[in-house]
Amino acid sequence: MEDVHAHSGALYLLSGSPAGGGDSGRMLEMAVKAGLPRAFSAPWERVALTAPIPVAQSVREGRVVWVAGEEDMARRYPRIAVVLPYPYCLAAAPLISAGIPYGALYITWPASHPPELSATEHALITAACDHLALRLRRAAEQGRPLVVEPQFPRSDAPAADSAATEAVRMLDRLPDGMCGLDVDGRVTYANAATGELLGIPVPLLTGSQLWNALPYLNDPVYEDRYRAAMLSQHITSFSVLRPPRDWLSFRLHPGRDGVSVHITPARAGVSDSAAEESRGGRPPRLVTISHIANLAIALTEAVGVSDVIGLVADEIMPSLGGSALVILAADNGRLRVLGHRGYRDPEVVERFDGVPLTSQIPGAQSLITGVPSFFESREQLERVYPERYATPDGMAAWAYLPLIASGRPVGTCVLGFAEEHRFSTDERSVLTGLGGLIAQALERARLYDTKHRLAHGLQEALLPRSLPALDGLEVAARYRPATEGMDIGGDFYDLIPTGRTAAAVIGDIQGHNVTAAALMGQVRTAVRAYTAVGQPPGQVMESTNRLLIDLDQDLLASCAYLHLDLRAHRAHLARAGHPQPLLREPDGTVRVLDIAGGPLLGVDPAADYPTTTMTLRPGSVLALYTDGLVESPGTDMDDALAALATRLAGATGPLEAIADALVGPDTPAGRHGDDIALLLLRPTR
C-alpha cells in the first residue's frame, strides 16, 4: 500500500482442495485488512472461488484485475456496487507460486487515481504477490498450517503522547468541535467543544464509535457517510438534529489512518440527510444491510431453483460460517427436498424427501407455522424434538428459516453449522429477513422451471422426434431454442417421404413463444398435407401462405421447401423470404445458391413463389437453416454468411459431425437471442 500510494487493502488465503481440478468448494478467507474497517467487507469475509468478485476472478484467471472506478464497478460487479456505492478504484491480484494458487489480495485508491493502472504500479503489485506467494508455498512445503488468525483487538482508549500536549491545548481553546476517528470509527481524541456540542462528556465519547455513543447518530445513514469518506478519500459532510431543536453540521476529512471530524452548529432545516430524528429503537447495522443487499442483487440473476440454491450457498453460507444447506418445499402434503449443499452423504438429506408435513421435525414445523427456529447446539434441538431422526445430518447447530412469499409459506431453508453456533439478535434478524428474499426468488424459480418443462414438452411434441431413413440420402438436423425467453420458438424442419422422391422443409415463425410454437405446428401440418396431395414446391408455398393469412394470427413466417429426386440427382426448390441455402460440392467448394423467391408467408394472399431446379450430385451437402444461425446484434449479415460457408467448407466426416460444427455446442455460455434450426441433406449415390 505504501509503495503504490493506496489507501486500503486486504489479503485472502485460499482454503479447500480442488475436486477434480475444479474450483467448486474452494474458499477465499480474509486474513488481513488495513486502511478501512473490516466491517466494510463483511459480506466478503469468506467467498467462494467461483464468486463474481475481483479477488476470486484474479485467482481463477491468474492475472491482475483492475476496476477503474464507481461506474466500472457497477457495470462489472453489481453486487459489490450495491453494497459499496462509492467512488474508488481497485486492483486485485493472485498469490500464485509454481502454478499453485495460495490466495489473493486487493488494494484500493481514491477516485482521483488515473483511470488506468500504471506499469510501475502493476510491477510493484505483481512483485509483492510473487514474493508473498513464494513464502506461502515454502510454509506449505514445510508442513506449517496456513490459517487465518483472529483480529488483534484495538485499545478502547488512545495512548498518551506528550509531544502533542500543546496541540491538544490549542484545540481545546477552539469553539468548534474537533475529534479524530480511527479506521474503525472509534473516537481517539475529542476537544472540549465536541463534548459540549454533542451533549456527552468527552471521556464517555473516547474509545466509542460516534453512531453508538449518540442515539441521534445511531442511524445507518450517518455511518454510511463515514464509509463513503473512507472509501472515496473525499471530504463528506452532513447535518443532524440533536434533540430537541439543535442542528449540528459534521464535516469529515478522511486520511489513510482515520478521519478528522469538524463539528459546528447549523441552522435549523439545513439537514442534507434523509434520516429522521432518532426513533428510540436500535437500527440495523450496516453489515446487516450489506448482507441483504448483496443477496438481493444476486437473487435477481437466479433463473431456476438450482440457481437460487447455488446463490444462497455461495453468498450466505460463507458469510455466516455455515457448513450445509437444504431447501425444502411442500408438495401434496409432503416435504420435498429441492436441493442441498455441503453434505458428503446425500442420503442423510434425501431421507426427508416425501416425509408428511405432519411429522414432528423442525423442517416441517417451520414450513407449517411460518416461525423461524434457531438451535445453537444438539442439546437444544433434541430438547424440543426428541425424535431420533431429528438430527441425522452430523451438524451441531441449525437455523430453520420459513420461506414466506405473498403471505404464505412456500418452503424452509435449513442452514447447518459444523460446530455449535451462537445466533445473536442481529444475526437472527438478518436470517429472518433473508428468508423473505429467498422465498420470493424460490417461488419465481419454481414457476420458471414449470414453464420451462411445459415449453420443452410442447417443443418436442411439435418437432419430429427423428427423421425418416431414406435410401440414398443422409440427413442431419439441429434445433437450438433462444436463450432469452421461454426456450421455445417457431423454427421448424421436416423431411417427408413421397414415394420415389422426398420433400424437405425448413421454416421460421416470427417470435419465440408459445403462440409462435403453436402456429409452427399448424404450418408444419399444412405443409405435410399439401405435399401428400402432390402439390409442387411453388404451389405448396402459395397454399401455406393463404392458410397463414386465413388464420389471422398477425405473425409472419419464412420458409424454404424442396422436392428431391434422388435418382435424377435433382432438387426443385421454392423460397418464401427465407435465407439462401448453402451448397458444398463434392470437391469441397461452397457457394450460396441464388434461388428466386417470394415474400414472407402471411403478407400477400396473391403472392407468387417461383420454383428453381438445381443439380444435387452424390457427395454434395445442401444446408438449409434459419436466420438465427447467421444473425446476431452488431454482426454484418454478409460476413456472418461467409463465416458459415467457411465452417461448412472445413467440416468433414459424418453429417452429424458437420451439423455440430455449424451449430456449435449447446452450452449456457453460447447465448443467442433467436432460435436456430439446421437441416443438412447429402445424397450418397
Image: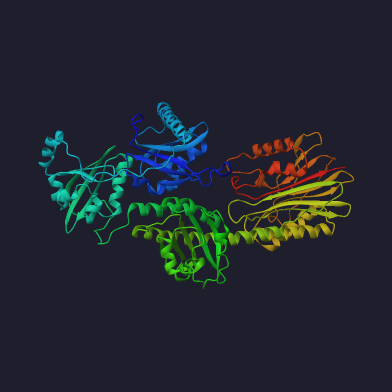
Task: Name the one closer to the observer, 39 or 289.
Answer: 39
Q: Is 321 on the left or on the right of 476, as rendered?
A: left
Q: Is 567 on the left or on the right of 155, as rendered?
A: right
Q: Please, which colouring scheme is shown?
A: rainbow
Task: Name the one closer to the observer, 406 or 571.
Answer: 406
Q: Quadrant of the C terminus?
A: top right
Please give the name of the residue rendered at 34% of the width and 52% of the height, measured from the top-left corner.
Answer: 286
Position in image of residue 325 (x %, y %) = 49, 57
Task: Name the one closer to the observer, 461 or 637.
Answer: 461
Please give the name of the residue rendered at 68% of the width and 58% of the height, measured from the top-left corner.
Answer: 459
Q: Is 576 on the left or on the right of 637, as rendered?
A: right
Q: Is 155 on the left or on the right of 115, as rendered?
A: left
Q: Quadrant of the N terminus?
A: top left
Please give the name of the residue rendered at 48% of the width and 50% of the height, measured from the top-left corner.
Answer: 314
Q: Residue 377 is drawn in which quadrant?
A: bottom left
Farthest-out residue, front:
143
Position in image of residue 21 (x %, y %) = 57, 41
Question: Would you say residue 456 is visible in this rendering?
Answer: yes
The correct choice, above or below, for 651 with respect to 280 in the image is above
